[in-house]
Image (cartoon, helix red, strand yellow):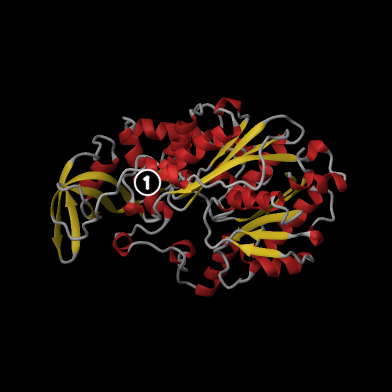
Amino acid sequence: MDDPERIPVLVGAGQINDRPEVAAEGMDSLELMAAALRAAETDAGGGWLPALDSLSTVDQLSFPELTGIAPALAARLGAAPAIADTTELPHGDSPVRLLHLAANRIGAGEARICAVVGAEALRTAAARARNAAGDARPGDILRASPKRAGHPYRRAFGLVAPTDMYPLYENAIRHEWGQSLAEGQAETGAIWARMSQVAADSEGAWLRDPVTAQEVIIPGPANRPIAHPYTKLMVANASVNQGAGFIVTSLAEARRRNVPDARMVHIGHGAAAHEPYEVLDRPGFTASPAMETVLTRTLDLNGITARDLAHVELYSCFPCVPKLARRTLDWPLERPVTVFGGLTFGGAPIANYMSHAVVAMIRLLRGTADRGLLYANGGIVTSQHAILLSGAPTDARFPQDPDVQAEADARRAPAPPLDEDHAGPVTVETWTVFHDRDRHPTRAVIVARTDSGARTLGEVPAEDTALLATLMDGSLDPIGTRGRIRVADGVRRFTF
C-alpha cells in the first residue's frame, strides 16, 4: 500500500502584483516573495510557514545586492527550514524544476512541508535606476546582467539577450514549415490574441485588456518592432513587479491539517533535458530535440496523450517556443496554450513566470478530475522541464528521476564547426533585424553557412536600407539564398 507520508500534493498557491503609484516606491524581490508565500499559506488554511522543512527560491536579477535570499526570506517568514536554497541561474524552467524537487524530497522522506517561490521587481528597479541616473538613460538591467554569459563571437554581433536570439529560431522554423512571413505572423497573432483573452480573466495577470491578432502583429507606436519579426506585443514583458509561490506537502500532512481532498492537487511524472548551452553550438534553429523528448516522455510516463489534457501551459517567452511545443503535442491552434496569460500579458518576472502558471493551474484543477501539463523553458530554448498536475490522484511515485538527457542527445544531429574569420560566399541559415526604440532598423545579423558547412556570422548595417527592407518585407525568404561576407575595417558585412 502506498504510504501517504511519501505522496506529494499541492495545497497552497499565492501570487502578488505590486503597482504603486510611484514605481520607485514599489516592493523589492524579497518583499514580493514574502507576500506571495504568505498568500499561499492563507490559501492552504494557515499555519504552514513556521513548519517548513524546505524553502526553495528562484534566482532573481532585479536587485543583485540582495544575496542569501532563501535564508533571509526564511527569517522574514518566521521559518527555520533544514533546506533553504536558490537556483544557480534565473532560468525559466526553475519553478517546475523546484516543484519536481519538492515532490522528490517528500517522496524520499526528506521533508514534510516544502515551499517554492520567486519574484522580480524590474519595474521598481528600473524606476530607481532612472532616478539615480538623472537625465541619463539608465543601463539595460537585463542585457547588462553578469549572468548573461555567452560566446564572445556571438556577443560581438549583439546577440546577447533573448530578444536578440529567439528571432533566429522564429525565422528558421517558418522557413522549415513552408510558411510565408504573413502566414507565420498570422499564427503568432492567433496564439497571442487567445493568450490575451486568458489574461483578461486571470487573477494576477499584469495586462488584462484583450487584444486582437491584428493588434499583435501590426507594428505601431504602441507596438514597436523589437527584432524582426517580433513586435513588443509578441515578447516577454519583464517590466513588472510580480511574485508567486506554492506549498507542497505530503498527503498525510495535508490530512492531519484538515485540508479537504478537493483543495489538493496531485503531481504526476515529469521529464527534463537541455540543449547545448551555447546557441552557436547547436545543429540548427528549426527544432529542439530536448523539448520534443521532454514533452513526449512526460506524456508517455503518465500513460496519456495530449488529448487527455484539459489544460496546458506552454512556455511563451517568444512565439517560436509554443509553436514548436504545440506541434510536438499536436495541440490545436484554437485551444489556449496558457492558463495564466503568457509572458506578454500575464507578465514575465524573468525566471519565475511558471510559478504563476502553477498557481493558475492549481486553481483550475481543484475539485476536478482534470489533468494539466506544465511545460517550462529556460535560456534560449535551452533547459526544458515538464510535469503533469491532476485534480485526482495519479499513479506517480516519488522520488523519480526526470532526466531524459541521453534520449534527447540521441535525437540531436552534430553541430557544424564555427568559422569566425570566413570571408567569401555563404548561404543564409537564419537572420534577424534589430530596431531602436524609435522603430528604426539599426542592423541585421545573418547566421550563414560556408560552402564547407561551417557556421559564420555577418551583418547588414543601418545605412543599407534597401537590403534591410528586403529582409523584412516578405517578398523574399532569405533562408537558403546565396550571399557573400566581405570583411573591411573589422566589419563582417553581408550582401546577397
- In the image, residue 365 sits, relative to residue 403, either above or below, namely above
The percent coordinates of residue 87 (x first, y second) are 57, 61
Residue 337 seen from this side: no
The amino acid type of the residue labelled 1 equals: Pro
Instruction: Classify residue 489 as left or right of residue 264.
Output: left
Quarter holding the N terminus? top right
Badge 1, how many Cα within 10 Å: few under 14, some, many 20+?
A: many
Instruction: Classify residue 189 as left or right of residue 441.
Output: right
Residue picked out by circle 1: 167
Residue occupying the point 49% across, 31% down:
329
- In the image, residue 129 sits, relative to residue 280, either above or below, namely below
The percent coordinates of residue 118 (x first, y second) are 63, 57
- In the image, residue 418 sits, relative to residue 128, either above or below, namely above
Residue occupying the point 80% across, 48% down:
44
Residue 139 seen from this side: yes
Instruction: Classify residue 293 as left or right of residue 363.
Output: left
The percent coordinates of residue 88 (x first, y second) are 54, 63
Residue toward you, 296 or 91:
296
Looking at the rendered structure, the secondary structure element under dot 1 is helix
In the orientation shown, which residue stands out farthest toward the left?
A: 424
Instruction: Classify residue 418 as left or right of residue 102.
Output: left
Residue toward you, 259 or 424:
259
